[in-house]
Image (tube, coloured by chain):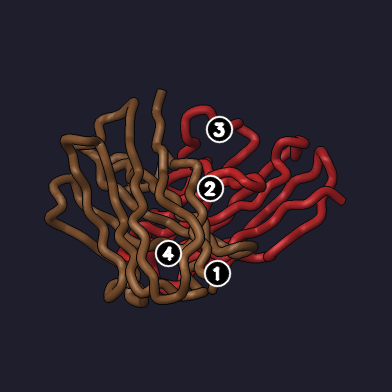
Chain colours: A brown, B red
Amino acid sequence: EVQLVESGGGLVKPGGSLRLSCVASGFSFISSTMNWVRQAPGKGLEWVSSISISGDYIYYTDSLKDRFTVSRDNAKNSLYLQMNNLRGEDTAVYYCARATGFQQLDSFDYWGQGTLVTVSS
Amino acid sequence: IQMTQSPSSLSVSVGDRVTITCRASQTIDNYLHWYQQKPGKAPKLLIYAVSALQSGAPSRFSGSGYGTEFTLTITNLQPEDFATYHCQQTYSTPRTFGQGTKVEIK
């Protein structure tokens, strides 16, 4: 069974930091480009970041690249998102998601259940 | 690349035919995918590459289009289809999504 399990969300004050984790099982994590997607309350989906199989290629949405850092540990089947200097507008459910690869044009076929990050004083 | 969905919501009845449109601000060839999301749940891939049904997706869902204009059609809407639908392009980074279309019960 495919599973992506996020953790690390919670309540944090503005200016604070959080590190999200996503542990994968049931598919070949080391062969998969991984992504973070977030969804603010009542809003649409926003792609945050992607990281290639080896970690050599990393992309961010422009507005976040100075504060967020994505990484992975293939030995632990784990994806991470370090979030610094958090703001109220970062309040969202954060999902990790797998990209399918070229055969399915990099659509996102596996998603975690999400972890809620709330930024508030 | 900006993705614009219309309408943002619609009220329909079981058995209806539903059409949702997604427009890209520049050509994305066929790098267009559709996701279904139910309240409190993660999105689920429904259709990839414009018209290819993801494994397990019902055949009442179909997609069409190319370039900048795309359509998701649901024929004979079922109770379990009431959800929010998102389009996404993976032609380039950032991998942008449309704002979502909520399909509600009339």
* Residue A93 x %, y %: 51, 56
The answer for which chain carries disc 1 is B
The residue to which callout 3 is attached is B57
What's the CA distance linking mark 2 and mark 1? Answer: 15 Å
Front one among A50 and B87: A50
At x 64%, y 63%, the residue is A42
Pointer 3 local density, CA inside 10 Å: few below 14, some 14–19, many at least 20 = some
> Which residue is labeled 4 in the image?
B96
Residue A69, position as x, y percentages in the image: 26, 63
Which of discs 3 and 4 lies nearer the camera? The answer is 4
* Foreground tag (2 vs 1): 2
Q: Secondary structure at mark 4?
A: loop
Task: Report the residue marked by disc 1.
Answer: B4
Counting residues from the start of the chain, the first of labels 4 and 1 encountered is 1
Residue A30 is left or right of residue B71, and the answer is left
Mark 2 and mark 4, same subunit?
yes
Q: In terms of sequence position, does the residue under pointer 3 or pointer 4 come before the other?
A: 3
Q: Amino acid at mark 4?
A: Thr
> Crowding near pointer 2: few (<14 within 10 Å), some, many (20+)?
many
- Residue linked to disc 2: B35
Parent chain of label 4: B
Which is more foreground, mark 4 or mark 1? 4
Q: Which of pointers 1 and 3 lies earlier in the amino acid sequence?
A: 1
In the image, is B29 to the left or to the right of B102? left
Q: Secondary structure beneath disc 3?
A: loop
Q: How many numbered dots are placed on residues in this image? A: 4
Q: Are marks 4 and 1 on the same chain?
A: yes
In front: A38, or A108?
Answer: A38
